[in-house]
Amino acid sequence: MRAMLGQSAAFLTACEQFRRYAACDVAVLVEGETGTGKELAAREIHYASCRRDCPFVPVNCGALPDNLIENELFGHERGAYTDAKSAQPGLIDHARGGSLFLDEVDALSPKAQVTLLRFLENNEFRPIGGGNSRVSNARVIAATNRSLHQCVADGQFRQDLEYRLNALYIRLPPLREREGDIPLLAAHFLKLAAQRLDGPSKTWTDEAMQMLCAYPWPGNVREVENVALRAYMRTDQSVVDVSAIAELVDITGDKEIEAVDAHAAEPMDMRYLVAKGHAMLAFERRYLTRLMICTSGNVSSAARLSGTERRQLGKLLKKHGIDTRRFRAQP
């Protein structure tokens, strides 16, 4: 099983919750942004519990159509409908003794929510075409990238179902809250890329790692994995530098730059030299901002990285009104 990786305080706190909840055999709700590893967290709980030798059955709730929800979950008996030539167990049966992982549970339709609620009330279900009810001993672990409490407040999710699913609660921290984990993850996924592609080992340059650490990672851990794979494939050398990730991680995030870019793109009736001047200003400001982020506002390091004289770089920073203090780490 692929393990979760991290060493930050926020990550270790979540891992401690996994271990505690594994020993408590009730429903668990896992909330977290896209790419934070909700299914991995569910597997951590399952394989740390006494159910580890029984199946872990993942279900994508967003892919369950209303007309098939009962058939998918509960299965059917032979002859239940025209094409039912043999009995077919449902996902709940497959998860017997183990864990049923309901991913994207917030995507369930109103009808599907009622169907699931009826099952969770007493763990009983009846296959389509079956006469007697059956009892499931599968543990339910649900996950969502939205706040289920807010979905209830917005009238999009049943409150009674939320109560059933939310016996125990875990919030997975986004990567921007996991201080110190990015270097660890970036190195791990670069090594993993080499293994997947059966290629030589590669390492990040210090400048590239600084850029990775400055990026907010909206796609979280999954995005780190994708960036590492692409950067590995773009690099022929044994080290992966800034040029391999410049287009993959946009770390400017500067509204002033966007305003300059918009102004530069507006009028097609401006003269060539004027348009060129606007474009150059936009490029310079974007480059300098990215340079300051990479070097934490250290002008000497930025001069070495950019291959310019420190004095010349200082003039450019002054020209664009860039205060290097805003990029320095706060004490």
Image (spheres, rainbow, N blue to C red):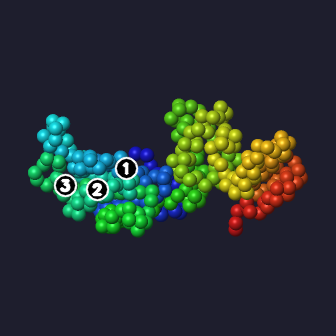
Q: Point out the image quarter for the C terminus.
A: bottom right
Mark earlier in primary sequence (2, 3): 2
Q: Is residue 8 above or below residue 224?
A: below
| Residue at image point 14% right, 47% down | 129
Q: Mark 1 belongs to which amino acid?
A: Gly
Quarter of image, res 233: top right
Mark positioned earlier in the residue sequence (2 or 1) = 1
Residue under numbered circle 3: 125
Q: Residues within 10 Å of mark 1 (few under 14, many from 20)?
A: some
Q: Residue at x 85, y 57 (%)?
A: 318
Q: Residue at x 68, y 46 (%)?
A: 208
Q: CA distance from mark 2 to mark 3?
A: 16 Å
Which kind of residue does numbered mark 3 sit on? Phe
Q: Quadrant of residue 80?
A: top left
Of tags 2 and 3, the one toward the viewer is: 2
Going from N to C along the chain, the mark reached first, 3 or 1, is: 1
Residue beneath disc 2:
111
In-front residue for pair 70/289: 70
Would residue 254 be found to the left or right of residue 303 on screen? left
- As measured in the structure, the alpha-carbon distance from the residue carrying label 3 to the one carrying label 1 is 21 Å
Q: Which mark is residue 74?
A: none
Above or below, 187 relative to 144: above
The residue tagged 1 is: 62
Q: Which percent across, then down, holds residue 79?
A: 13, 40
**What amino acid type is highlighted by mark number 2?**
Lys
